[in-house]
Amino acid sequence: MIRYEIHGENIEVTEAIRNYIEEKLSKLERYFTNVPDANAHVKVKTYQDSRSKIEVTIPLKNVTLRAEERHDDLYAAIDLIVEKLERQVRKHKTKVNRKFREKGMEKDVFPAFPETEKDEEPENEIEIIRSKQFDLKPMDSEEAVLQMNMLGHDFYIFNDAETNGTNIVYRRKDGKYGLIETSAE
């Protein structure tokens, strides 16, 4: 069962807004045979130019679904974000599960990857303001790229399933992907 934690910034989350969000996000449950026990973190924000932004993060056991959308109409933003999340779920369930069925591997490969923060750092001073730890699970570079895209990140660190080395996939400025392989020398 998915529980909803809905918070508003510069907006009061009315019962109508809350009901609309819960009704729309509950559509994601149809993609699971057993609906996961999860908390959907929803942040609704309005700006002075009356534009709205909605962010949804749903950490699940094997994958973290995350999307954000900005729009002039809050309800339209909610509809658009649900479409994004549905695409992420479908992509995860089709491509990844098919690949693992072909390999005969277990499906418990994708770690719940914590989101990174993008903060600007002062020009002359390097200050680490946040540190995170997470378990690396074996996968190949294709699964790592899928996980990176589902999270909306620019890079993803993983253990290579064949070499057991720690590798990094990243999104290049031209929109293609790069792979950094490490060695133990």
Image: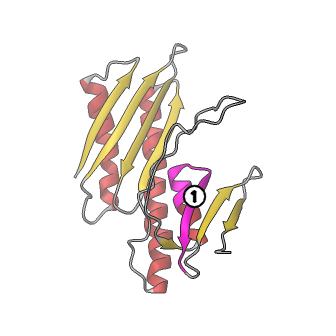
Residue for point 36% across, 51% down: 59
The residue where tag 1 is placed is 156
Task: Say which of 67 and 162 sits in front.
Answer: 162
Residue 87 at x, y percent in the picture: 48, 55
Q: Is 159 inside the magenta-drawn segment?
A: yes
Image mark count? 1
Residue nearest the observer in this picture, 160 or 39: 160
Going by the image, does 6 lie left or right of 64?
left
User: Is residue 145 placed above or below 18 in the rendered structure?
Assistant: below
Viewer-side residue, 58 vs 34:
58
Q: Amino acid at mark 1?
A: Tyr
Q: Is residue 148 magenta?
A: yes
**Side of 178 relative to 153 (left or right):** right
Q: Residue furthest right?
A: 174
Which image quadrant for residue 178?
Answer: bottom right
Q: Position of residue 41 (x, y in %)?
A: 34, 40
Instruction: Look at the picture and state if 87 lies above or below 183.
Output: above
Q: Is residue 160 above or below residue 28?
A: below
Q: How has the structure been colored for display? A: secondary structure
SS under mark 1:
strand
Residues 64 and 163: in front is 163
Q: Which residue is found at the position 52% from the left and 36% from the top?
A: 129
Which x, y percent locates residue 78?
42, 35
Q: Which residues are magenta?
A: 147-161
Residue lying farthest top?
48
Q: Residue at x 24, y 55 (%)?
A: 37
